[in-house]
Amino acid sequence: MPKGALYLQVYHAIKNAIENGQFQEGEILPTESELMEKFGVSRITTNRALQILASEGIVTRKTGVGTFVGKTRPVSDALRSPDNTSSSREMNNSSIPEGLPLVGIVVPFLTGTFGQTIVSTTEQILNKRGMSIVLAASYGSQQNEQACIHRLVECGVKGLIVLPVNGPYYNDAILSLRVDRFPVVLVDKSLPGIPLPYVTSDNYGAAKELTDYLISLGHKNIAFYSLPLHGTSTLMDRFDGFIDSLKSHGITAESEYHLTLSEGRISNGKGQQVNGISDFLNKHPEVTAVFAVEDSLAQNVYDASLNIGRKVPEELSIVCFDGGPVKNGFWDFTHVVQDEAEMARHCVRILDDLWSSDKEKALEPVVLPCRIQVAQSTASVPLVNAARH
């Protein structure tokens, strides 16, 4: 199978089999258990792959009966490959919709390291075409997210770019956009069962590579610190990448090393969170590294290490996604860098495609590669052990 998140590998394998004629229209596919055995993956992974296929109309799922091949339809070359880089091409004004040239963007927070470049790059692209953006923040609340979407649509925006809040469910406003065929692109997260185009990073591959890097430094007792997974595709991919890296190196994934933030809104209860991490680190002195799913949580770990007198990186290494400067010093976390500028270009390209046709298009997910930025928050285990003695 091709590289990438496991559910995407299964997705592509089944899709290719259908397109190559191995399964005909109306034919039942192997059961989930058979697919699990064939691809060596979990039921969750298999189910997610089938959900995407169903959302694109490639298969039809009947509860208690099975999954059947649907009526396949061609996907345009411009949209076929998740690795397509044609979005970087110059876009002309022919696809600008009639009326007020506004595009709405909904982000979880106005602060933070992830999302700002997506907003700024989108504005730059649209500005050159005589269009403008309207920005709204959901502040991590699905209720606020729904209100933002309604408000922007009422303002007359011709398309939406939405960075959904974490959670297993979607709000009614996003479902309404789908029903009304309103031009919308999701960023960073997919919503299972909702056939909407989305742009994301290879969170699985990046998390695996970041964990591989820690292991290359000699770390074996690594904690994973995250927001509640709750079925959130991005977080689940990062966790899967972390776990698979440990397994590939013969390291047991200790359940007690998985720390979960009690509050989904990371701005709340910071002192309590830091105290909880401090207690964990005191209880588990054998832990020499922490993988945080985002930089705000990495900052919590850094503050906790200061509280208990464990030096970073001499006594504790910290890695994360979307790292930024530590408030207490002039250095960065070792972190995953997402290509937000390319995300923005794909978003505008997809809106162009949606504007240019009255027909609904079945879009494959756009999954972009990441890179690892090694910085001052990581050190080898020999250095950690030396510092303790």
Image (cartoon, rainbow, N blue to C red):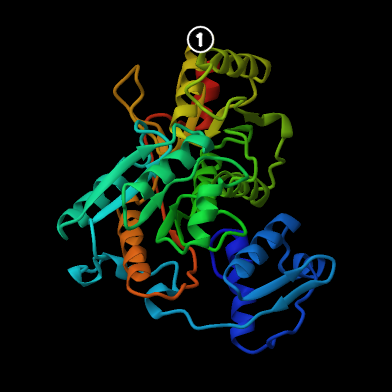
Crowd rating for badge 1 (residues with CA inside 10 Å; few <14, some 14–19, many 20+): some
Q: Is residue 310 visible?
A: no
Residue drawn at (21%, 72%) of the image: 94
Which residue is most to the right? 64
Of 35 and 171, nearer the camera is: 171
Image quadrant where one finds the C terminus: top right
In terms of secondary structure, where does tag 1 sit?
helix
Q: Position of residue 153 (x, y in %)?
A: 38, 50
- Residue 118 or residue 326, whichever sits in front: 118
Residue 171 pos. (x, y %): 56, 45
Is residue 141 depicted above or below 176 in this figure? above
As rendered, which of 168 and 300 lies closer to the eye? 168
| Residue type, mark 1 in image | Asn
Image location of residue 300, percent across then percent down: 49, 21
**Residue 329: % across, % down:** 32, 19
Residue at the spot x=65%, y=40% of the render? Answer: 230
Q: Quadrant of the N terminus?
A: bottom right
Depth check, front residue: 372 or 368:
368
Q: In this view, does 361 lie above or below 169?
A: below
* Residue that appears at 70% across and 60% down: 47
- In this image, 49 relative to 318: left or right? right
Residue 182 falls in image quadrant:
bottom left
- Which residue is identified by label 1? 307
